Structure formats: C-alpha cells, structure tokens
Image (cartoon, helix red, strand yellow):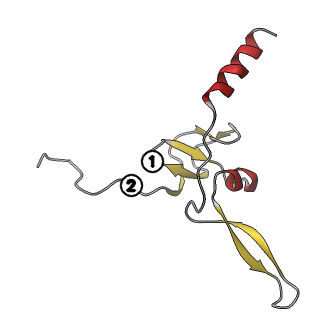
Amino acid sequence: MRRGYRSQGPRANRWLALKYAAPCKVCARTIPAGETAFYDYAARTATCHEMACCEVDGLTREVWHGSPVSGSWVPAVSDRRTGTGYVRDPGEDMADRWNETHS
C-alpha cells in the first residue's frame, strides 16, 4: 500500500463549516468561508442553510412542533439528505449566459 493512500470508503456528505467560499448549487448565492453548508463530496457542491434551498435539495424532515393536541408537522433541516438531490439543468445555465450577453 502506498504511503498516504486512504483505504477507507468515500466520505459521507455532511454539514460542515466551509474552508473556502462556494456557490450554493440551488440558489447560486456565494456561501462565504466559515459558514455552515451541506457539502456533497461526490459532486463537490455545497448547499446553503436557507430552508427553501434545503427543501429543494432534499435536506429536510418533518418534525412535530407544539403541544401533543394542537401541534402540527413542520419542516426542519435534517443532518443528512433524505430525498433526491437537486440537479441543475446544464441547458439552463447556457440559456442564462446567452440571454445575458445578447440582451
């Protein structure tokens, strides 16, 4: 085995404080370094902590909030992806660039 070679499996996707700034893969907002984001190691993408972005990317779960009688289910940020991840259409980016340069 080579020195420095990792024999473990792939890293698990998780919430972490970003070491470098990265764009959110859902809203394209720049997430500054040090802010908490969900990092997908396989796709090398980050999702910001906004509830709307988390819902689109499958990072929410339903939790009971309130009293046992009159409470209700509300979405909460999950510690792992529970649904399918958001996949941005590559044609969408090209159309946006075309419209920006040819307007």
Q: Amino acid at mark 1?
A: Tyr
Q: Earlier in the sequence, mark 2 or mark 1?
A: 2
Residue under the point 75% across and 52% down: 52
The residue pinned by badge 2 equals 11
Percent from the top left, x then y, of residue 85?
59, 50
The answer to whether residue 78 is above or below residue 2 is: below
**Local crowd size for mark 1, using a 10 Å CA cut-off: few (<14), some (14–19), many (≥20):** few
Look at the numbered discs 2 and 1 and tell me whether their residues touch, using CB distance below 8 Å.
yes
> SS of the residue at dot 1?
loop
> SS of the residue at dot 2?
loop
The answer to whether residue 35 is above or below residue 92 is: below
Q: Amino acid at mark 2?
A: Arg
Q: Nearer the viewer, residue 5 or 83?
A: 83
Percent from the top left, x then y, of residue 80?
55, 63
Residue under the point 57% across and 49% down: 34
The residue pinned by badge 1 equals 41
Residue under the point 68% across and 36% down: 28
Q: Quadrant of residue 73?
A: bottom right
Q: Quadrant of residue 90?
A: top right
* Residue placed furthest toward the left: 1
Quadrant location of the C terminus?
A: top right
